[in-house]
Image: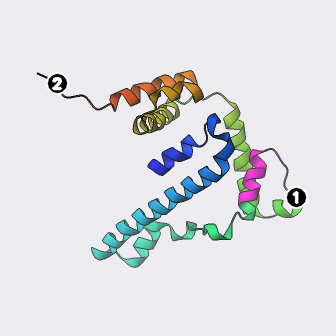
Amino acid sequence: MQHCQEVLRYTEPDQAHSWKRMTLYRSTDAADTMNMMAMLIAAYCQHTGMARDTLQSYLQVGQQELRSAGPQDDDRAHVAGMVGEALSYEAMRVPANRMRHHRGQRQAEQAQRPEDDPQKLFTEACLHGLRARLCDDVEALDSYLPPQVAAMARQVAECLEVPEPATA
């Protein structure tokens, strides 16, 4: 969770100089940690007798992609859709590229609309409030969040505050 929270931190305006480097570092750290956790759970499931094909199904091994290969054509198509660029004729002939391009276009359109889903707002506020409390930086919430999210995040952070013991 801490690595995921740091990904959020490095997307804040005051971190603009290092956002590319640090979001990639922290997101890959988080991915590695989540992978390690999945493998520990898988080892336990295997230890308790889960069938190999069931385990592979649950691990969704077909979705595994190596970072060492770098961004692939479908990743570049996704980004092109997000930034409003067209794909070449050759790239559009590949179904995965078309799908990812359209997904990127939809995500870009959704990002332009004001946030209207209360569950998304609450989730974002919880993540920011948790990070603010862990970093003991609740005051920074007002500097980079929309007021509505900052207010909810502040409430979350206050709920997480450790009460001081009563003195006699």
Residue 67 shows in this picture? yes
The x, y position of residue 57, in whole percent, is: 46, 69
State yes or no: residue 78 in magenta: yes
Near mark 1 (Cα within 10 A), the count class, few <14, some 14-19 or many ≥20, is few
Cα distance in 3D space between marks 2 and 1: 68 Å
User: Which of the 4 image quadrants contains residue 96?
Assistant: bottom right
- Please tell me whether residue 100 is drawn above or below residue 68 in the rendered image: above
- The residue indicated by pointer 2 is 166
The residue mark sitting in front, 2 or 1, is 2
Q: Is residue 111 left or right of residue 49?
A: right
The x, y position of residue 39, in whole percent, is: 41, 69
The x, y position of residue 124, in whole percent, is: 51, 35
The x, y position of residue 72, in whole percent, is: 72, 65
The residue at 49%/63% (across/down) is 32
* Residue at the left extreme, as displayed: 168
Q: Is residue 89 left or right of residue 120?
A: right
Tell me which numbered mark, 2 or 1, is placed earlier along the sequence: 1
Of the pair 161 and 156, the residue shown nearer to us: 161
- The residue indicated by pointer 1 is 88
The stretch of residues the image draws in magenta is: 75-85
- Identify residue type, mark 1: Ser
State yes or no: residue 90 in magenta: no
Residue 49 shows in this picture? no
The quadrant the C terminus occupies is top left
- Identify residue type, mark 2: Ala
Of the pair 135 and 94, the residue shown nearer to us: 135
The residue at 78%/45% (across/down) is 83
| Disc assigned to residue 122 | none
Near mark 2 (Cα within 10 A), the count class, few <14, some 14-19 or many ≥20, is few
Q: Is residue 60 left or right of residue 95?
A: left
